[in-house]
Amino acid sequence: MTERLLTVTDLAVTYRTRHGDVRAVRDVSLHVDAGETVALVGESGSGKSTTAAAVVRLLADGARIERGTVDLLGHDVAHAAPRALKAVRGRLVGLVPQDPTVSLNPVQRIGAQVAEVLRIHGIAGRRGAEVAAVEALRAAGLPDPEVRARQYPHELSGGMRQRVLIAIALVAGPRLLVADEPTSALDVTVQRQILDHLETLTSGTGTGVLLITHDLGVAADRADRIVVMSQGRVVEQGTPDAVLGSPQDTYTRALLAAAPSLRGARTRPRTSPAAKAAPPDPVLEARHLVKDFALPRSAGGGRLRAVDDVSFALPRGRTLALVGESGSGKSTTARLALRLTDPTSGAVLVDGEDVTRTHGERLRALRRRMQVVYQNPYASLDPRWSVERIVTEPLRAFRVGDRTSRAARAAELLDVVALPASALRRRPAELSGGQRQRVAIARALALQPEVVVLDEPVSALDVSVQAQVLDLLAGLQADLGLSYLFISHDLAVVRQVAHDVAVLQRGRVVEQGDVEGVFASPQDEYTAELLSAIPGGRARTTVGGAR
């Protein structure tokens, strides 16, 4: 008989807010057996992450478990005392939180943070814990783990920091792993490596995995069972074949229809009439960009070439996607294009004008024409400000309109990014990760720019809102002739929205061209590897047949 690791029964969780109580989880029941992976899927705000936090009793301030039980290998987690919980966390259950920016200690080296779990539970001494920490980082897919162990969180990319969290969760060999969006910040090849590692762990040691994800492709490929949540309730559950091949609930069918990794055919991006009539010169061009960074002494010193002779042209009214693994130079290239940092050599041209050394009023004018949506909504939004103030900040900075017109513009923008007008009074801490990213997108659209640089703009969004946002961006592009520089590790999304693609590896462009041509017949081995790692391959036939 299979051992039952986790049993959640009739769980109800409520948040106390300034505007009254919010029932985030309602009568949720689920279980995870030894060696089993259970995927918990649903939209942002559906209660997935709250359920995961309740399993390890790490709920936010103001949250309380109203009723129900959480049984973890005989331990009553829902009502356990703090001392009892300390013995459970890390040893019996490991947690991979969603946000690496706020989950790692900024003043402690990476290796020490991984080793801390082993030392707290008395599993290893100081030296043994240091060695085990390096091996855990290696297993989590970090290159040069000995070097990374000596670095601090700010010295790593977002994807690397997420892999550190995975190493921390796995280093003590827990019986149950609660993974809250563990690969949302990772490129597809490392995502596959991590998920392969989790599969090896569960099959080899009997560890169970509760996988919280908005990526139905990942759930389809990796889960033994799928639990679908909507508005705090479980609406459907079963095997991937049953849930994805023959969904019974309307909500599940809507999620499947919106999932880019499960769509069989490519949705060709629209080209606006304005773009067709525009001058042939690109609106944005990069010529032989090079960017070197000095490495810290803790990493051995020297210089790192993050961008190496990168050239591309962004036509008016089109979308150019920059894709590649974490650390390939995508985001650094975007910062160079935006003039947020200066290149070591090379040039950036806007409408044919070299703006590489632009300063003062000319640079300020450039800022209005080019806006950005950053990858991490947790770090890019001021936690002290209301959503209305965040969205209207660009309007105030450029003295556009008065207070009344700015407020009206904020309400309009929230509507187009699928947020209610009531969110205007809230602060970022009161929003889910996906809701925060929608606020960031609304802010970037406030000034109606010509070029928008989208740095992983939908990586934090569930599939239905992701589809809404991508449709929104496509509609704005068609109506206004906007040009998008789209940075992404999600090739399934790129396949749906981009006209052209440039593939970066270790700071260099290894292949570029029309998306259809590159994806159908990749010429570089690295591009082929990226395409083969797109999740959902095991389920696309099943889902297509269901339709």
Image: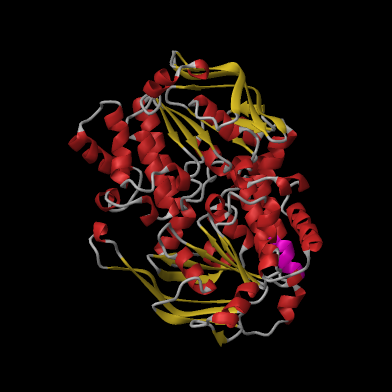
User: In this view of the protein, which residue sits in the foreground, 64 or 500?
Assistant: 64
Pick the residue in front: 232 or 111.
111
Residue at screen point 43% across, 81% down: 346
Q: Identify the residue at horizontal 49%, vertical 56% (top origin).
A: 531
Instruction: State the predominant SS element of the stretch in magenta.
Output: helix
- Which image quarter holds the C terminus? top right
Which quadrant is home to the N terminus? top left
x then y, percent, for residue 8: 55, 19
**Is residue 375 toward the left or the right of residue 445 in the image?**
left
In-image side of 474 versus 136 (left or right): right
Q: Is 494 in front, or is 132?
A: 132
Q: Position of residue 38 (x, y in %)?
A: 52, 29
Q: Position of residue 153 (x, y in %)?
A: 37, 50
Residue 128's quadrant in the figure?
Answer: top left
Query: Over which residues does the magenta segment extend?
Result: 473-479
Q: Vertically, is 50 above or below 271?
A: above
Relative vertical location of residue 127 with respect to residue 332 in this rendering, above or below: above
Residue 11 sits inside the magenta stretch: no
On the question of residue 308 being in view, the answer is yes
